[in-house]
Amino acid sequence: MSRTDLEQEQRVSGFMETVKQLGGGGRIWRQELRSMEDTVSGWVAELANRKEAPTAVFVTNSFICQKIYAGLVQAGMSVPEDVSLLSFEENGELEHLPVPISVLLQPTRDMGMLAVDMLAKLLRNIEIKNRETMNCSLIIRKSVRSIPTDGNNPGRGNHEKTKTFHLD
């Protein structure tokens, strides 16, 4: 398994574990694209034709998220009315789509700096913490709708919000 595959597996596993801890997870449908060159048309067709379609799609990188968004639109599906869409990571490109995509941002630059600092300390025989906590940001845009619990449809928000939480 390549390093990239391992990172994606950890992201997806963490996501699925958290959904289950929050009381969901009975209807998680997991599909993997093995390469940036993979087509999403078959995947989108399968999603659109499922008996119980997922309420949301969580994508592990912004490039594939753009492909999935385009595929959903081409298949006649509406984001977020038919399916919500959320991505890990971006460099600003997802906010400029016709429906701006909500994003979970990890502090990747800070993670890299921390990793180098920890490595330097280890090389100098300086003790390091076993665990570090870092802040992540959830940028809520228009691609995710609330799931009504009382039968009402609250619709989607009209503005971007950012929430910060800890990455442990």
Image (spheres, rainbow, N blue to C red):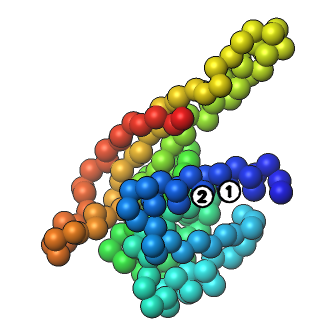
Q: Which residue bears the numbered disc 1?
A: 9
Which quarter of the rendered picture does the C terminus lie within? top right
Left or right, 85 with reference to 108: left
Residue 104 numbered tag: none
Looking at this view, is 42 or 123 the one in front? 123
Q: Position of residue 131 (x, y in %)?
A: 61, 27
- Label 1 sits on a secondary structure element that is helix
Name the residue at 75% across, 65% down. 35
Name the residue at 46% across, 34% down. 166
**Residue 61 figure quarter:** bottom right
**Residue 67 figure quarter:** bottom right
Q: Position of residue 165 (x, y in %)?
A: 42, 37
Q: Can residue 122 be seen in this view?
A: yes
Q: Position of residue 97 (x, y in %)?
A: 45, 60
The amino acid on which the numbered mark 1 sits, given as a three-letter code, is Glu
Q: Do the residues labelled 1 and 2 touch (CB within 8 Å)?
A: yes
Which quarter of the rendered picture does the N terminus lie within? bottom right
The amino acid on which the numbered mark 2 sits, given as a three-letter code, is Val
Looking at this view, is 73 or 154 the one in front? 154
Q: Which residue bears the numbered disc 2?
A: 12
Looking at this view, is 3 or 145 the one in front? 3
Left or right, 26 with reference to 64: left
Q: Dot 1, how many residues are within 10 Å of its Cα: few (below 14), some (14-19), or many (20+)?
A: some
Q: How far apart are marks 1 and 2 (CA)?
A: 5 Å
Left or right, 135 with reference to 164: right
Looking at this view, is 128 or 136 the one in front? 128
- Label 2 sits on a secondary structure element that is helix
Q: Where is residue 25 in the image (x, y as percent from the top left)?
A: 46, 67
Marks counted in the figure total: 2
Above or below, 45 relative to 163: below
Above or below, 88 relative to 143: above
Name the residue at 60% across, 58% down. 12
